[in-house]
Structure formats: C-alpha cells, structure tokens
Image: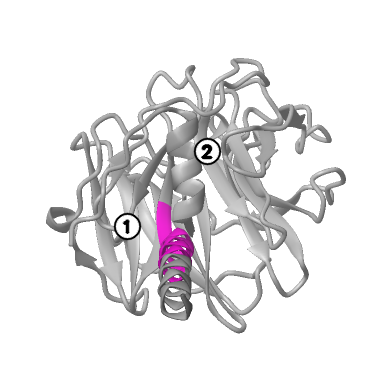
Amino acid sequence: MMFRRNRKNSRVSFFLWMFWLVFSLSACDNDKPVYFFTSFHEPATEGLRLLYSYDGYHWNDLNRVLLKPAVGNQKVMRDPSIVQGPDGLFHLVWTCSWKGDRGFGYACSKDLVHWSAQKHINVMAYDTSTVNVWTPELFYDDTTDSFLIIWASTVPYKFDKGIEEERNNHRLYYTKTKDFQTFTPARLFFDPGYSVIDGTIVNRGAKDYVLVYKDNTRLERNLKVTFANKVPGPYEGESPAFTGFQTEGPAVVKVGAKWLIYYDAYGEKKYSAVSTLDFDSFEDISTEISVPKGHKHGTIFISNRKVLRKLLRAFHVKEVKPVK
C-alpha cells in the first residue's frame, strides 16, 4: 500500500511540475518583446492601424482598425504616434485635419483594444492665423517624468514672406504635459531657417538627443538629423540629407546595436529604411525589410507578446509566428 501511495504521489508531483513548467514557459514567452508600427491607410478616414514584428525588420499587418477618428475639422487620422508611459498606459496623438485646425487628436488605452474618449488638444489656439497642426509626435522624457509633444505648423508671415511660404512654411513647435489634462503653452521647438515637418526625437543616452526631421523646402523634401544635449534643445549641427528626394515620415527604433530609420519614399511609391550606428553614416537596408502594402507612416514602439496576443484575440486575427 505504501508503494502504491508513493507512486500516486509521484504522478501528482509530475503533473504539477509539468503544469508549472508550461506556465513558466508561457509567462516567459509573453514577456518577449514585440515591435509595433502605428499606421493608417489613405485617405485616412478609417482610423488607427498597427503592424507588428518580432525582429524589427519584417512586419505583419493586424489588418484591423483599432480606433476610428472622431475629432477635428476633417476627422481624419494621419501620422499616429504612440508612446507607452511608465505606468503601462498607451498614449496616442494624431493629425486630425489637413488645414483650418489648431489642434491634434488624443486618446489613451491600457491594452490597445479599449480606448478612452477622444480629445481635441487645441495647442495653437493662441494664434488664430495658424494654418494647420501636422504630424504630432510623442516623446517621454524620463529626466522630468513628462511627455513632450512636437508638431509642425504654418503661421503665415511669422518667418519668410511670400505666397509659397505662407502656404507651406512649417516650423516645429512643442508642449509638455504630465497627465494629458494640462499642457504648457506652445513654444517654438526647432527653426533652422527653412520649412521643416515630421520631427522625431531619439534618446541615445544621458544628455544625448537626436532630432530626425524632414527638410520640407521645395528642392529638398528629404530627411536630415540634428543634435542636442537636452530634450527641448537647442538642436544644432544639421546634417546633409541621408534620403532621396520626396521622402518623409521617419520612424526610428533600435534593434541590437543599430538604429533603424523607416521612412515613406512617396516619390517612388515604396517604403524604405536605413540603418546607422552613429547618426553620421547611414546604410540603405530597403532590401532587408518587408512592410505590408498600404502602410502609411507612423511611429514604432516596443511592447510584448502578451499585448500582441490580446490584440489578436480581440480582433480574431491569427498570429503570424516568428521565423526561426
């Protein structure tokens, strides 16, 4: 009898051990990083879309609309930018109108499935001559525990005068917030003396920041970088262009030792990317990436497989497994 009892106890212990092993492996797998790429499709009236990747090079389309735009004059969602705060909450901002609007859209989510009510953040209300608010971009500043939002606006006759400049002479502005309830007054962020849009901040280390942006002047329309030792700048030492004519929408992510900069080569009607170790020399890696057709530029953030799998279950989408 003692022998049989011991055998029974051994079987129970074995199954408990197996359950613990499977649970532990599942928990570890859920914590593995996943890259997410915010997206929209033209004509930008449908709403927020997401791509996901296990390696930062090859992207899969969730192929679902996560949030339909409901604020702004035109109620579009272009240039969506997401940052996850230290409390785990995802914050989203986006371009909500082409023109005649002095703010951007905002919403937040705990899981990217369920979203808060949308808000219209009227950041340029103080200047009624403002033509537009384009490409808002989020950055979490851990040195001040606050979020910085930069965007591009045209304010007629504030800089160079002329018909073309009035219509298309952008500068970058910014505001800061800790809670997305109160915001500091809008201030000029970056003015290199020419039209600029699509600003993206990269933190390389302590007191080491890079601004990737589009030179929006007629003969350039390409991407450049500039540098600062603190988030608000001043940013100095603008680089030569590292992309060709008619490129925009930089999205930056670090994969291993390299920084990858994705961008929309809209003049060639394709999506491209470069890699860099130092933001001084850049290598074209467009043949090494795969981006689904129809994807339009947003930003890249990193979360985990638990977040991804909840998204897939919620939208009834089959997961594309990573290639081993």
Query: Which comes before the other along the chain, label 2 or label 1?
Result: 1
Give above or below for 17 relative to 164: below
Task: Name the residue beneath numbered marker 1.
Answer: 54
Q: Verify whether residue 273 appears in magenta.
A: no
Query: How many labels sit on residues?
Result: 2
Q: Position of residue 9 (x, y in %)?
A: 48, 72
Which quadrant of the rendered structure holds the C terminus? Answer: bottom left
217, 294: nearer the viewer: 294
Q: Is residue 87 left or right of residue 45?
A: right
Q: Position of residue 91 (x, y in %)?
A: 65, 46
For image coordinates 70% across by 32% down, the residue present is: 103
Q: Is residue 216 left or right of residue 60?
A: right
SS at circle 1: loop
Task: Name the residue beneath numbered marker 2.
Answer: 80
Q: Kindly identify which numbered label has been placed on residue 105.
A: none
For image coordinates 52% across by 38% down, the residue present is: 80
Three-letter code for the amino acid on which mark 1 is drawn: Tyr
172, 42: nearer the viewer: 42
Q: Position of residue 166 (x, y in %)?
A: 57, 31
Give above or below for 140 relative to 293: below
Q: Which residues are magenta?
A: 17-35
Q: Position of residue 76 (x, y in %)?
A: 54, 21
298, 4: nearer the viewer: 4
For image coordinates 83% across by 48% down, the residue present is: 183
